[in-house]
Amino acid sequence: MKMKIHLVVMFLVLGCAEAPSAAEPLIQYERTHSQVAHEDNTYSLTVYDDGTVEAHFPRHSPQAGTYRWTLPPEEIRNLLDLVAPIGDIESESLLTSIQTTRSQGLIEVADTDRVVLEINDATRGQNQIVVPSPEIWQKHLPEGHDMGTVATIAKELAAWMRDQARERAQ
């Protein structure tokens, strides 16, 4: 009888205990290549609030595979500082600028890559930007346009991601 009571109490305690909270993404970056025919055509990077990083390179890339590692707090802050400017950029205004440029017949870009940048940080803001090939469009929009900021952030995150994967592959 005493054993049954202990088992019941243990069951109740374990059943009522809260599960550990899952890490939340702070930064997300994706680049989906439009000219790659198979399903594995997206580069992705996710930095979680617990310092965990997950980077995926499609099978056609030299770094093909999924990498996981942990960053020290200082490096997380550096990445958040890099991405922070997207907190103030409206995805819709970027797309409107692209549409205006297209409608003026100034440029038509086909087969563009889809780029997603997202920040989810209490002090630096929360936002998601989804645009086609920002590095191409920045060249056709006025200097100082937000598209240049998006292109720079995407380029720097991609380079950082490649460098990190190379270090871990050695």
Image: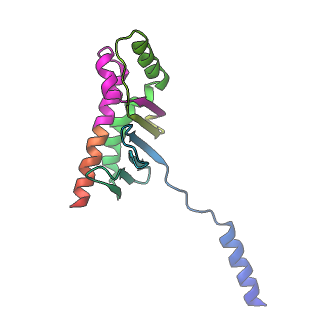
- Residue at 36% across / 51% down in the picture? 55
x 37%, y 30%: residue: 112
Q: Position of residue 148 (x, y in %)?
A: 32, 24
Question: Which residues are drawn in magenta?
Answer: 126-155
Q: Residue furthest front?
A: 37
Between 12 and 112, the residue placed more toward the observer is 112
Q: Is residue 146 left or right of residue 25?
A: left
Looking at the rendering, which quadrant does residue 52 occupy? bottom left
* Residue nearest the viewer, comparing 115 with 128: 115
Residue visible at 70% across and 76% down in the picture? 11
Q: Is residue 19 magenta?
A: no
Q: Nearer the viewer, residue 34 or 126?
A: 34
Image quarter of the C terminus = bottom left
Q: What colour scheme has been applied to the protein in the rendered image?
A: rainbow
Q: Is residue 2 left or right of residue 73?
A: right
Q: Residue furthest right?
A: 1
16 over 101 or under it: above or below: below
Residue 61's spot in the image, x, y percent? 29, 49
Residue 83, how many percent across, how many down?
37, 36
Which residue: 79% across, 90% down? Answer: 1
Quarter of the image for residue 81 reads: top left
Image vertical order of residue 14 relative to residue 26, above or below? below
* 87 to the left or right of 76: right
Quarter of the view holding residue 104: top left
- The tally of labels here is 0
